[in-house]
Image (spheres, rainbow, N blue to C red):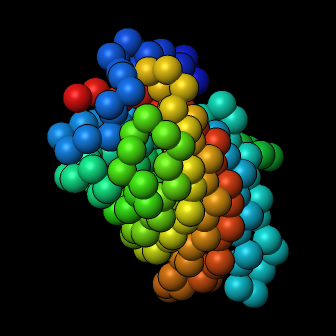
Amino acid sequence: MMTRRLTLAAGMLLLVPGGAAFAQQGAVEFGVDAGYELSIVDNSDNVSSVGIPLQNLRIGFFVSDAVSIEPSVALAILSSGGTTLTTFSGAASLLYHLSQDPAQSRMYLRGGAGIAVIDLGSNSVNQMGVSGGIGVKAPAGPLAIRIEGHGGYSFENDDLASSIDLGVLFGISFFTN
């Protein structure tokens, strides 16, 4: 049921009009990403995750030709041996585009912070983190292909150990003016 809803939401994003002049002040970027992430957890086993076809939903608001603000959300539900782990995370990032020509491939730098809410059924905990990345957006007609490598740090709290998070995202963006 959840997969069907996410597929429907991603499909509706295809209806958003786009164009070559997508990255101008006032433009909005809608995006979906698939990805791989490795979490190196302090005093524990490492955790890797693959999110295909959808790991992350994001929306970017261009405040200038070079700068956008991008909130994102992610949901993961894992079940094994009668135990279910649900993680919902949200983040806010600032992207700085190294080129201001939206008709060309553009590299960008990203930095941000977020929170993950982890529900173990009987217990729910929150974990804060920071992240940064470097990526490229390549125009493809009314869309853009996006590839990003990123790293982050999740802070230790009373319930969870700290971790270093490394990953890569492969995404598609749709733009409005």
Residue under the image location 28 percent in, 36 percent down? 28
Query: From what the image shows, is residue 155 above or below residue 4?
Result: below
Residue under the image location 51 percent in, 32 percent down? 139
Image location (x, y in percent) of residue 88: 47, 51
Can the viewer see residue 131?
A: yes
Q: How many marks?
A: 0
Can the viewer see residue 126?
A: no
Residue under the image location 44 percent in, 16 percent down? 14
User: Which image quarter is the N terminus in?
Assistant: top right
User: Which image quarter is the C terminus in?
Assistant: top left
The quarter holding residue 171 reads top right
Q: Is residue 112 left or right of residue 53?
A: left
Image location (x, y in percent) of residue 118: 51, 60
Q: Is residue 5 left or right of residue 164?
A: left
The quarter holding residue 92 reads bottom left
Using the image as rendered, state which of residue 83 and residue 161 is in the foreground.
Answer: 161
Image location (x, y in percent) of residue 75: 51, 44
Residue under the image location 51 percent in, 70 percent down? 132
Using the image as rendered, state which of residue 88 and residue 141 is in the foreground.
Answer: 141
Image location (x, y in percent) of residue 90: 40, 55
